[in-house]
Image (cartoon, helix red, strand yellow):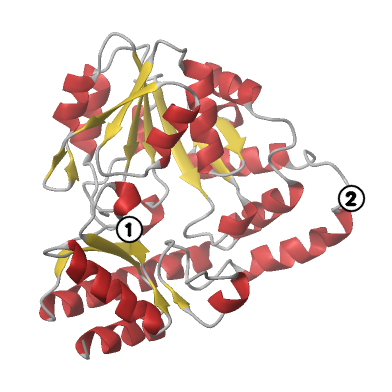
Amino acid sequence: MVLTREKLTNFIKLSQNENPHGPSPLSVKAVRQMASRLHLYPGKDLEELRNRLAEKNRVSSRNIALSSGSVEMMDIIIKAFTSQDEGIVTSETTFPMYGILSRINGRTCLFSKMDRLGIDIENHIRLCGLKTRVIFVANPNNPTGMIVAHRDVQRLLESTPKNTFVVLDEAYGEYVTDSSYPNALSLLPQFPNLIILRTFSKIYGLAGLRIAYATAEESVVKELEAHRTPFSVTDIAVAAAIAGLDDEEYIRRSALINSKERISLYDALKQLGYDVVPSQANFLLVNFRDASSKEALYRRLLDRSIIVREMEPFGLKNALRISIGTQADNQALLKCLESA
């Protein structure tokens, strides 16, 4: 079935880890106010957003690099810090764009073995060779929702050569409730080869506007900004992001609702007999005994206008990823599963 934008309005979409409550009303208001400036080239408010992010993260604005979504920043990192004969390390079961961007840029990408669907830092360290220049770690990991603890991130940084960049992709960081989750910013002064990625696409609900940022040592940020395509970050995205930062209560509430619904949905799926991976993100990974069982459920849900994510691009043939929706969305999903 081809799902057009028109058809999608009639579906419960639990496939792309979006904030089901949408963007902050303040971000919506900011976008509307920007409508009369769409004829102008962007760039006017970049410094304001950098300053706001610097204040939020307690760093200098010179430690903040902006990009049109995290994927653009990943591409910039590969272009800026690797050459043709140098490579990248990431995990077997993780965000596919690390490997895809490596291939697009003609770089070698090595994939570290997982430890029961968890990222194995020791395997990353073993794979890191003399020509490894970038290590990508999704934390929480997509699609498993599992985290790498602070002590393991520190161990990776301590074991990594100073000319190899460790990139922590914290796209889902705002959803984490586990106290062992890294305080990555505290590691920056000690490890200038650390780059931390954050995005406005998930909890801030701005996926359609493409806005993200990296926090890193000043010289690293200069190199990242030098490789960014001019005008890639739009004023309308910047305005929405600034407004989203202002609405702290909306973000807090989105995180709290997600946490409650994540626990509730996890428990209900387990009670129904499903093999569910504990998650710290805004999605759950469900494993099946074989591909036919997975496909049957995927089709059943689709027939009832519920879209979840198949996992073949992530290297998992017998699994589905389910985004945490609204309470009504999750109840509709469970009602369909209970009748299966």
Left or right: 262 in relation to 192: left
Which residue appears at 59% of the width and 26% of the height?
62
Q: Amino acid at mark 2?
A: His
Residue 167 position in % (x across, y down): 38, 31
Q: In the image shown, does 118 or 27 lie closer to the viewer?
A: 118
Up-down relation of residue 228 to residue 8 (above or below): above
Which residue appears at 68% of the width and 41% of the height?
233
- Mark 1 / mark 2, whichever is N-terminal: 2
Up-down relation of residue 322 to residue 301 (above or below): above
Residue picked out by circle 2: 39
Q: Amino acid at mark 1?
A: Ala
Left or right: 144 in relation to 217: left
Q: In the image shown, does 136 or 245 lie closer to the viewer?
A: 136
Which residue appears at 44% of the width and 65% of the height?
252
The CA span between labels 1 and 2 is 38 Å
Kindly state the secondary structure of the residue where label 2 is placed.
Answer: loop
Image quadrant where residue 113 sits: top left
Residue picked out by circle 1: 281
